[in-house]
Amino acid sequence: MKLNSYSLNNYKTLPQAEKLSAELKEAIDVVGNVFPFKTNNYVVNELIDWDNVAEDPFFKLTFPQKDMLSKNNYSLMWNTLMGTNNKDIIKTTADKIRLQLNPHPAGQMDMNVPTINGNSISGMQHKYKETVLFFPSQGQTCHAYCTFCFRWPQFVGMEGLKFMNKESATLFEYVKANKEVTDILFTGGDPMIMKAKVFASYIEPFLQRRPDNLQSIRIGTKVLSYWPYKFISDDDADEYLNLFERIVKSGINLSIMAHFSHPRELDTEAAKIAIQKLRATGVQIRTQSPLLKNINNSPEIWSEMWRKQVNLNCIPYYMFIPRDTGAQDYFAVTLEDAWKIFREAYQNVSGICRTVRGPSMSCTPGKVQVLGISEINSTKYFVLRMLQGRNPNWAGRPFFAKYDPKAIWMDDLVPAFEEKFFFEDELKLMEEISLDKTA
């Protein structure tokens, strides 16, 4: 199958577009001028149920929806589009809205930026000591864009909001020089948008002169959901599989961090074949997704998804809370509901599925897990745990927050028994040091 992409410019040429109401088309046109929009023929033909399009999870995952913008911002964008065809004016309005939507949360633009020889490195992030994130410049797009994506600023053309790096030598030297680094995570965008030869150019230095500290290479991707033919019939499918096999045989663990947001993504024949081919190379496949209102906010969906993943030899890894960026309000569930959904789904699978962790918030201090709600002296409290922290000593530490039934993110919580959370003073110092470096 050949990949065909559809965007704001040509989605109305789809044969299925006749099933879209005028209201849905208007929403796509308005919201699609603010958030990135791209889908493809695999998503359109094999995932979306066009007989129930308005409620279909994959339509909502890839096509912009009206409620992804506030009423005021929707009206502002609609009025602009009705009043002018001037692309500069339209972009100015869109950028004004985008800047209200916390385009780079959790310290990505300052606290996570590494340095080498005193110079900041663009296109890399180093938040946790063991893991470096690398954004290859050729991988800063996707086969289709997720409407929940917290990296949406990568794709909207706003100056200064894009991470990317095309220097494989920089990555190699940084990993070699920083002995605490054991893992490289290739991210984007989607690294699997790249041709095998391009991706190999980043990998070859590590195969030829592997630093003693490097143990794992991870690839963050939704390719198995949105274009599994990458490993089946694309012209470089075998080249990719051979490269992966070489990585594994070199002694480096290779993990595909696969994003599956709904069990139906695992049902197509193409997805099953692609997973089989990857597993045959020795690659691990670990799975993760946000918990998304309007998409997968039921325990039945999650337990079904974990079971299907395990049956296909994938490892359930994370349930995330949607990050505080972009269309957060459209997708967010309360922390209480997130915990209840996770718990019920967890209770209805066997132990082999219980490798999954969550619900987890990837926020400024680190990955914070909601362990549950506890009642102490007739008062409710959130029980939390730091799964990963900017300071490694924070990892694994439990702590408490006051119960708030409306809370959807870490910033909504306040400490239960102390004036500050245990990490706050040190985090503030880290933020100040980062600001001094970028000043």
Image (cartoon, rainbow, N blue to C red):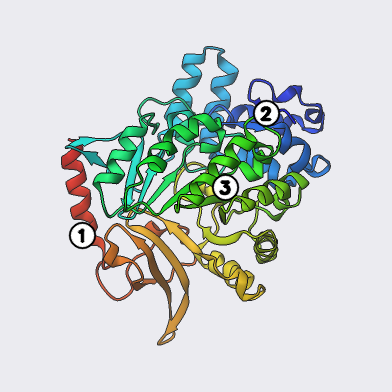
Residue ID for mark 1: 426
Residue ID for mark 2: 26
Q: Residues within 10 Å of mark 2 (few under 14, many from 20)?
A: some
* Residue 295, numbered label: none
What distance separates the C-alpha of mark 2 from that of mark 1? 48 Å
Is the C terminus in the top left, top right, bottom left or bottom right quadrant? top left
Residue type indicated by callout 3: Tyr
Q: In percent of the image, x 52 and y 68: which residue is there?
A: 336
Question: Looking at this view, is 255 or 332 the one in front?
Answer: 255
Picture coordinates of residue 165 (x, y %)?
37, 31
* Residue 330, numbered label: 3
> In the rendered image, is residue 190 in sight?
no
Q: Quadrant of residue 169?
A: top left
User: Does label 1 or label 3 sit earlier along the sequence?
Assistant: 3
In the rendered image of this protein, does residue 324 appear above or below residue 376?
above
Is the N terminus in the top left, top right, bottom left or bottom right quadrant? top right
Question: Looking at this view, is 253 or 27 the one in front?
Answer: 253
Picture coordinates of residue 416 (x, y %)?
33, 73
> In the rendered image, is residue 374 in sight?
yes
> Horizontally, is 390 left or right of 355 in the view?
left
What distance separates the C-alpha of mark 3 from that of mark 2? 18 Å
What secondary structure is found at the residue carrying circle 3?
A: helix
Residue type indicated by callout 1: Glu
Q: Quadrant of residue 415?
A: bottom left
> Horizontally, is 312 left or right of 83 in the view?
right
Q: In percent of the image, x 45 and y 54: which residue is there?
A: 251
Taking the view exactly as shown, the residue that stands out farthest to the right is 51
Asked whether the residues under the numbered discs 1 and 3 touch, taking CB atoms below 8 Å apart as contact, a structural biologist would say no
Residue type indicated by callout 2: Glu
